[in-house]
Image (cartoon, rainbow, N blue to C red):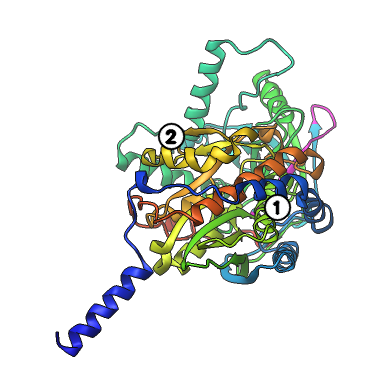
Amino acid sequence: MSRCCVFAAAAAAVALSAHPAPAAAQDLVVDTTGAAALVDQALSHSAVMQNLQYLTDVIGPRLTGSPAARRANEWTLERFKAYGLDGHLEPWQFGGTWTRGAFRARLTAPRPHEVTAASWAWAPGTGGATVTGPVVRIDASTPDSFVVHRRRVKGAWVMTRVPSLVWNNDGPPMTGADSAHQREFIRSVFTPFRDADSATRARMQQFANDVPYLLHSAGALGVVVDAGKEHALLNMSGSPNRILPLPQVVVAHEDFALFDRLLAAGTTPRLAVSIANTLTRDSVTQWNTVAEIRGGEYPGEVVIVGAHLDSWDLGTGATDNGTGAMCTLEAARAIAQAGLKPKRTIRFVLFTGEEQGLIGSRKYAEAHAAEMDSIQAVIVLDNGTGAITGQALQGRGDLEALWRAVLAPVAALGADSVVNRTKGGTDHLSFLPYGVPGFNFNQLERGYNHTHHSQSDTYDMAIAADLMQASAVMAVSAFELANLPGMIPRGEHSTPTPVLAVKVSDSLLVKGRGSN
């Protein structure tokens, strides 16, 4: 063999040892050694509630781009290091910041009434001035329907949808027909053109992107949105990737339904709104908190345990997702303080920017794209305070036996369900296009639909026993995945979706009302 061939063979051997071929799923025998010690750490020596209390009550809501989000990054890094992990803050670039200012909404006719409402995020305000006008409801579902109603929106606060179907849980239980009606309503509102051809769906998506700009151009004062929750709970969303050109106000369902009933009865409500938001458009640096326990045998291969650290700001971000973030921190503490040494590196990542479109995790995946074949799996917790019930396979039915074996040591804790369910809306999705096996644990609901993005998302909604259990399950799962004899088979690859601003039709890109 020639010298160059020797070097080539040696390089190939190094490459193979750095990135061994994935094993067949049935060959991945789970080593449960250490599981009992991890469960004991999580259940008998827990710091999860203490940490959650500090995060939510002291640091408070952690809107991406805010000083509180940065404080949360720094504090969680300090906690990881105190537990014996190596860590750092990993920067990424974020669109303009948004800060909630003073707000008031009042019904002035047909009678005075204080409206429970809040400004949508990444929407401008009124400069602090009170802006009064009638409330109108229009059909803005298609370009043709919008044209019919366009002249009605000038000088008005505009409702573009009928009230949500919010069930009275104190009344009679739902019948089968009620459930079917509710499902059809959700489908018609959130996926109205799901069955259309791709060209039609693209055209209607573009129209939906354009609607706020069409309303602004037509002289509307702002948009009024139904919070869609009971008992005056609000909802929140928004992103610097979709900065709105006019105010958007989310209104408690009870008030939104009142407006609709008045309109149906022939009485026009009048709404007075004052908003003083601050909105910037320059890109700013944000950070993910990253810490790890280095593997003893295959340090270049990594299990990622994650959750998002950012939150909305109506509450203090306890169940969305302080609970997941603090369970991630607690899983790290349990492994480190149990004195266990994994074969592969276990990396704990607290992402920011999740609430604005999984931006922090997508940026992380982009930055680490060359390493994706070395990531054993990504496991995420992001469905509230509820105990883990098991794992959703995310379409990876070939891994059912593996996950049943992984969860066997915590089955007695109630985490024994393995279902081939596909879950959306959280950070594991950012890794799937690269073929990385990514999963979001199933959890007990525990009222998550109430606390989610609302003003009731506070520390007192957290359930200590559930979070201790979830921390144990995460720690055991991460440690066992790190100690598998081989790499988990890769998933299908696809083109990652880049982080881009929502495209608005060029004809509508006119100067907005400024950052107020």
- 233 to 291, vertically: above or below: above
Q: Is residue 85 above or below residue 205?
A: below
Kindly tell me whether residue 247 is visible in this rendering. no
Check disc 1 and give the amino acid type. Met
Q: Which residue is mark 1?
A: 326
> What residue is shown at x 59% (from left), y 71% (from top)?
91
Where residue 478 appears, as percent x and y from the top left, is: 55, 52
Q: Residue at x 67, y 64 (%)?
A: 65
Q: Which residue is mark 2?
A: 420
Give percent across and percent down for residue 233: 74, 34
Can you tell which quarter of the image residue 59 is in? bottom right
Q: Percent x, y for residue 339? A: 66, 61
Please indicate whether residue 51 sits to the left or right of residue 336 in the image.
right
Quadrant of the rendered structure where residue 366 is? bottom left
In the rendered image, residue 113 lying in the magenta stretch gets the answer yes
Q: Amino acid at mark 2?
A: Asn
Q: Give 88 or 108, whichever is nearer the viewer.
A: 88
Mark closer to the chain start, 2 or 1 = 1
Q: Quadrant of the N terminus?
A: bottom left
Q: Which mark is residue 494?
A: none
Residue lying at 45% horizontally and 53% vertically, measured from the top left? 484
> How far is mark 2 from mark 1, CA to CA?
27 Å
Q: Quadrant of residue 136?
A: top right
> Residue farthest to the left?
1
The span shown in magenta is 109-122
